[in-house]
Image: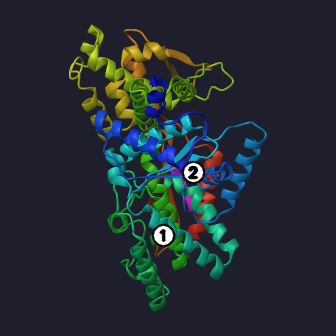
Amino acid sequence: MAEGRKSRSLLFEGAEWTFDDLSRVHDAIEKVARKDLALDLYPNQIEIISSEQMLDAYSSIGMPLMYRHWSFGKHFIQHERAYRRGARGLAYEIVINSNPCISYCLEENTMALQALVIAHAGFGHNHFFKNNELFRQWTDPDGILDYLEYARDFMQRCEERHGRIEVERLLDSAHALMPSSVFRSRRPPPPTPRQAEARQQARRNEAERSAHYLWDRLPASQPASDADQIRQRKRAMHLPEENLLYFIERYSPILQPWQREALAIVRTIGQYFYPQKQTQIMNEGCACFVHYHVMHALHAKGRIDDGAMLEILHNHTEVVRQPDFDDPHFGGLNPYTLGFTMMQDIRRICEAPTEEDRQWFPDFAGSGDWHGVLKDAWANYRDESFILQFLSPEVMRRLRLFALTDDTNAPFYTVSAIHNERGYRQVREALARSRDISLLEPNIQIVDVDLQGDRVLHLCHLQQDGVPLDKRSETMTLEHMRRLWGYPVEMTRS
């Protein structure tokens, strides 16, 4: 009789699952997530997909709707071949920053693993997407799916009218320049499909009125030697400009209206992913912390049995495992490991701080309010600032972190700081800098062009720490810029 009551209290039994099981587990997870963690969530949309559909999602940068391009098919073949020969596995899930929040779960997952990934993606990532300030400022979860549908249909119409090869040549250059085509310091409002259509029609109308509609807006040019005129010209075009595709879209002398709209689509999608590049440690750490807390809470209440919990812990451990530096699978510091470890450590500091913790974190050590500290961090920090604010000596010791100095004039690396009293702050600052996107991606800006003169486009690479742009990247950047600009393009360094 007791065994029967125990069985009825379980959310599921065994590895097989049904959609009723998924619904029941989702509701139980939601109850814990809202009551224990007070998460603020978008509505969830859980989709079950096959391994081939998961591979397809990989190839199209994880988006549910996407226009066609040969590179997506190439990526699909690469991922599929590696998967079929056992050289790589598949992600347990893919989650989309949209409203509703869409989570793709692999149909081959066991029921225990489905529970884990629903908690991870449908509640951890979901809360982070909705509440982190970077995502709130820089993305449009309410409109992204409609915009992707518009983008797919627009590209398809372009292929029908102008030919697939012509469209692909344009997208080749646009995709290559996408990392240098985001607004880092200002955010224009993301277009809706209706606004994009209106913008496209306005371009067509203006092109019909004047073949030189770009130049009509500009004042007559004076000789380039006139410093005042150069400053006035730059001011009129808002130079320097960090978003390469945005400038080309507005001022390229050779592009047709449909090509300008295609560039706008590519840079809008690139801007959508900009916050994700800056919050990988926090985003994955939040999702891991949530699924770990929720799964333990359900197990403690008798809703998940010991066998399922062991499977969940095994998969959790694989996700947050940090390979040693000499391990064949080492690929740097695992963001899941660092994010989850730091967030668990924040809870420890709030509940049971040491004297060292009180010295490093006087504002919240021993407060007991780990919910509030974590929710504030999830909302208001990105990776580099999160590390600078919350990375503790305890975590540095546990992960055995140290700092390396790479002097270009020396034939070897130097260990400049280790996890000891003298090195803690240096290690923390070095790790934070390694997550600074301004140091990870080249900063290439458009600094000048005389549209009434020689039309030579002048770029400048702003070097960080004296690190130059590698020759191949510079050559390819100039080649793609020339293709879209139609006139000579030059690059200097500063």
Compared with 478, 193 (above or below) is below
Residue drawn 31% across the image and 27% down it: 389
Tag 1: amino acid: Glu
Residue 491: quadrant of the picture: bottom right
Judge by depth and name the residue closer to the eye, 342 or 308.
308
Do we see residue 442 in this rendering? no
Of discs 2 and 1, which sits in the foreground? Answer: 2
Does residue 142 appear left or right of residue 367 in this picture? right
Mark number for residue 377? Answer: none
The residue to which callout 1 is attached is 249
Compared with 400, 108 (above or below) is below
Q: CA distance from mark 2 to mark 1?
A: 39 Å
Mark number for residue 48? Answer: 2
Residue drawn 38% across the image and 59% down it: 140
Image location (x, y in percent) of residue 185: 35, 51
Residue 492 lies in the magenta-colored region: yes
Highlighted magenta segment, given as a residue range? 488-493
Residue 257 lies in the magenta-colored region: no
Image location (x, y in percent) of residue 141: 39, 57
The colour scheme of the drawn protein is rainbow
